[in-house]
Image: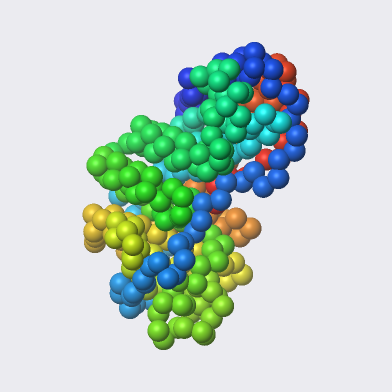
Amino acid sequence: MNDNGYIAYHKDFESIFQDIKRAKIGKLVPSEGSTISIDDFFAYSEAKVDYFDDEIKSLDPSKGKKAIEEFSIGGFDESFAEFSAIEGSIFNTAYSYVHLTEDDWRSYNWLSNHFISRSKLVADKSEKLIHNLDPNSYFKQVYARERADFLVDAVPSNTILFFDGPIIGNQITHYTMDMVDKLQAKRIFPIFFVKNSNSNMVTDEIKDLKHKFNSDIHWANESLKVSQCSQWFHYEDRVNKKNQKLFCYLKSFNDVSAQRIEMHPSTYHYLNNEVEKILNMIIYLMFENGDKRNPQVRPIAIAEKYARETRKYSNVQKLMKESGLIPTMNEGRGFK
């Protein structure tokens, strides 16, 4: 810990390797596709999308710079790697939250390890080793619970929280919705950012746009100028009415794809008259980040860097070698 933040560890972060050593789990082998994928949208037949308003908005980054003084803001991201052994896999995750103070960004970081095996014989050798027939799906649930607990603990009340990733994705949607409820009970208002989406929900569901564009991103890029935000749309799952969101598209630079900005309807109504100020603040923070190759709001970009560095700081490879494992790693950049 230092003046700019701290790193905390899961209670079993190191001791799990002692149990792995006692269980005599063997040499690691390369693992393909270790990035956890959180699906962007449900199939369009399961949801409906309508206009929430009908106005394309021109944003003002200079107003956004001034608005920063009115809000408490922070950003969240994580870094993830899977280490695969013959007997199972270690899932190593760094969760990072950064908060803007008067002087600088302050970081809060948390590390966890989980060993999951399809073999009950292996998992029965220690209570810290987990048995599950679908390790990747099970770990997504572990991730979603840890993420919510971390953010509820780390983020101060009355904060606008910029969050990398979609609010709705097939396997962990209900965990995310529960997290939104817990955060907003503390007056923490999460706003979600989605890059490089393949969604065609708008162009399939909005009658006057149907069959005219390849995807929503194609439509947004053609329709928006730099520093413009599209109309807001309302998404509702036809099966589970709780799964709702409002979203729009925002174009920051000419030569990069528009991004989708999402929030739960309750978040929008909580913020109400502040939404325009927040959109101005978002476009300013995208310009301030100044990276066209990775056009993110600055709080998320900083959280991403802290998450990567925190995982390096943990030196998992050393712990694995000491437990008898020989690591060969295929590291995923993060959760999509």
Q: On screen, 152 above or below 176? A: above
Tell me the quarter of the picture where residue 253 sits: bottom right
Front residue of 24 and 270: 24
Front residue of 330 and 62: 330
Residue at the spot x=38%, y=67% of the render?
Answer: 47
Tell me the quarter of the picture where residue 16 sits: top right
Apparent side of residue 155 relative to residue 195 in the rendered image (left or right):
left
Q: On screen, 113 above or below 180? A: above
Q: On screen, 267 above or below 152? A: below
User: Residue 273 at x, y = what percent?
Assistant: 24, 61
User: Residue 186 at x, y = what percent?
Assistant: 26, 40
Front residue of 187 and 318: 318
User: Residue 321 at x, y = what percent?
Assistant: 72, 20
Residue at the spot x=39%, y=59% of the render?
Answer: 262
Residue at the spot x=45%, y=55% of the render?
Answer: 169
Asked if residue 77 can be seen in this view, the reply is: yes
Residue at the spot x=53%, y=60% of the render?
Answer: 195
Asked if residue 311 can be seen in this view, the reply is: no
Front residue of 270 and 283: 270
* Residue extending furthest toward the front: 121
User: Residue 100 at x, y = what percent?
Assistant: 41, 41
Apparent side of residue 244 relative to residue 269 in the rendered image (left or right):
right
